[in-house]
Image (spheres, helix red, strand yellow):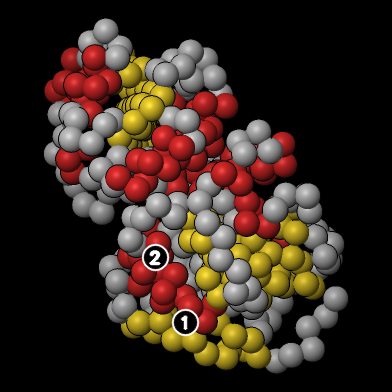
Amino acid sequence: MTVAQDVMPAAVWTATDTIEFRDVPVPAIPKDWALVRVEYTGVCGTDFSILHGTHPRAKAPLIMGHEITGIVETAGATGPAAGTRVTVEPLISCGTCVPCRNGNSHVCQNLKLFGIDQPGSLAQFVALPVSSLIPVSADVPATEVGLAEPLAVAVHAVSRSGLTPGESVMIFGAGPIGILTALVAQNAGAGRILISEPSEERRLVAEELGFETVRAGADPVETIRSTTGDAGADVVFDSAAHPAVAAVLAKAVRIRGTVVLVGVYKKPVEVDLQALAFAENTVVGVRVYTRADVEKAVDLLESGVLQLGRLPVEVFDLARTTEAFDKAMSASGILKVLISPSSEEVRS
């Protein structure tokens, strides 16, 4: 397939809290790159910080979008053929720093991402290295493929936790990452899973998916301790990244248990390091994901084992990008907002 047009529609972040819908040139395709026709772009918290002008690296004007689902329009000399549906590993690593040389390019000292440091997918087309493209079966609904990138974060978080079958889990935050982490932990054999979420709408989403939640107004620490014989959870996932959660992590996890920091804190917060040290707890961080995590996420999508079609998703046309951001930032019962350059469909 070839692209006959010279320009394409795009949603461009031009200034703080300002997105403009305009025509821009179709991107050039360097050697070993491919052109992808965008089907869906997921909106996440990183995009919020870009929109508000608080992201430390993003510079306007910018086409955001790093949660990418699309069809290869113009293939590279290698990689997926034209017509292949793909998800994208949007990381840009330097390849020369110590982490990169040691096989940890996902935590490259100079890590960058498409949609932040280079143009992303809030447009009709996006140009990407063929090495970043991961084929996904055409049998998987495209809206579910749109969850692949945050699902990879959840896969990485559960992998980092060392979770073993039967262990108890507590998750702070029932946003997209929290819910996906719960589903991945459940699939990995977790025993009791308890989710704490202040938003009633999102708490109801968790309950509709079959998860136990901390009831409205109840203390999450008291709840997890009362259900674990006052021991605390074996593994605690912090997907909320809120100072109030950081303050109670040491109380929610059992002695010699594990705390996984999945959400991204925007500034330093108070944590009871003495309690964590005295309990010999393990604290691990999560930044993004490895290539293997993305591939595992695709395997989960293709198997259908997580039944992601149950998740409430809403789709907005590209011209409604500002409205889509408003919806995504509302912490409503819509778990994930997707933006499509060519669809007026709304599914929830």
**Residue under the point 57% across and 91% down:** 23
Residue 295 visible in rendering: no
Residue kind at label 1, given as amino acid type: Val
Q: Disc 2 marks which residue?
A: 327
The secondary structure type at the circle numbered 1 is strand
Q: Is residue 166 left or right of residue 59?
A: right
Mark 2 residue crowding within 10 angstroms, few (<14) / some (14–19) / many (20+): some
- Given residues 326 and 189, the one toward you in this image is 326
In front: mark 2 or mark 1? 2
Q: Which mark is residue 12?
A: 1
Name the spot of residue 123 as percent of width and height, x first: 58, 77
In front: 305, or 23?
Answer: 305
Q: Quadrant of the N terminus?
A: bottom right
Residue 36 occupies which quadrant of the picture? bottom right
Q: Earlier in the sequence, mark 2 or mark 1?
A: 1
- Quadrant for residue 33, please give it: bottom right
Q: Amino acid at mark 2?
A: Lys
Whether residue 283 sits left or right of residue 79 in the image: it is: left
